[in-house]
Amino acid sequence: MLIKPLFSDGYVPGYRLFFCVLAASALMFADQHFSRMETLRAQLSTVVAPIQWVVSVPSDLLSWGTVALSEQQELMDENRRLREKMLTLSHRGQRMASLQAENAELRNVLNAAQKRDIPYITAELISLDNDPFSHRMVVDRGRRNGAYVGQPVIDAFGLVGQITAVSAYSSRVLLLADASHALPVQINRNGLRFIVQGAGRYGKVKVLHVPDTADIRKDDLLTTSGLAGRFPEGYPVAQVTEVFHDPGRPFARVTARPLAQLERSRHFLLLFPPPRKTEADSPWGDSLAISGAALSSAQRIANTLSAPDTARTP
């Protein structure tokens, strides 16, 4: 049986190549301009997930058989338990530097609210994006495990990134180093707040719009500031590696090194930070509402007294 090739061998591409290019262009256009493609991508990821698992089965079976034959299964299980325990302890220890600086400021403040531990689940790396200009990965936790879009992801050393797409059994994570990723941070030493953006390389991020007179130094620790409510406060993000002052320019050029092992980590934690309190949830919400009502009533009375008496006759 003669199998006809998909593309022609001549100098001019055949109609099959034209059809493939047309179809690819239509899919890219739809993915860029229609929000429903996110749902379609999530459904396709759910369909592809069993294939990913099947592909990894031979290597997993080979590894398991090697361990069983060498009588090291018990040691491997103990190593896995210790690794999970190390991740748990690292999750608690990452906030210590920020809490110590905050404790110095709140030492004389009475009735200071204590911060609670943030719930989390563990996750493991499935695959990395093959695009050299994109820094994304896929982990083995999805909608069935409670993962959601925008969820923070950390490893044993610092912030890794956030989830951008979720399927039933896996999630897609945008890494901190990606050029399209930005987040608010603060200097742990003095509390100055800035924006950190990825530079398209694993070992470098940029600190944006730093005034030339700002108190920022090399080796300063940058932690999450908690602004915007997406990333909880106090997690290490990066360490300043260079502060360059260009004469005549209002902003300094500042670069930093991410603390998370973006190229090497395989085990991660997906955080579940508590939702931000609204004005209605604030303990001062009722008093604020009462004060607002009282102020409105006083304003109405003042307007009445200052208005001309139209009913008075000469």
Image (cartoon, grey):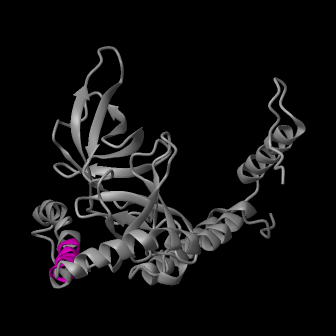
Residue at the spot 34% in from the left edge and 78% down from the top edge? 120
The picture places residue 243, in percent across and down from the top left corner, at 23, 30
Q: Residue furthest right?
A: 15
- Can residue 243 be seen in this snapshot? yes
Residue occupying image coordinates x 37% and y 44%: 196
Whole-percent x, y for residue 14 in the image:
87, 34
Residue 33 x %, y %: 75, 51
46 is higher (above) or lower (below) than 12: below
Please tell me whether the stretch drawn in magenta is mainly helix, strand or loop: helix
- The residue sitting at the top extreme is 248
Residue 113 in view in this figure: no
Q: Which quadrant: the C terminus? A: bottom right
Magenta-highlighted residues: 75-88
How many numbered marks, from 0 up? Answer: 0
Residue placed most toward the observer, 162 or 67: 67
Nearer to me, 314 or 246: 246
Q: Is residue 35 above or below residue 277?
A: above
Q: Is residue 71 magenta?
A: no
Q: Residue at x 15, y 41 (%)?
A: 219
Q: Is residue 134 left or right of residue 213?
A: right
Query: Residue extending furthest front?
Result: 1
Q: Residue at x 74, y 64 (%)?
A: 36
Query: Which image quadrant: the N terminus?
Result: bottom right
Q: Position of residue 98 (x, y in %)?
A: 19, 61
Q: Is residue 77 magenta?
A: yes
Residue nearest the viewer, comparing 42 with 179: 42
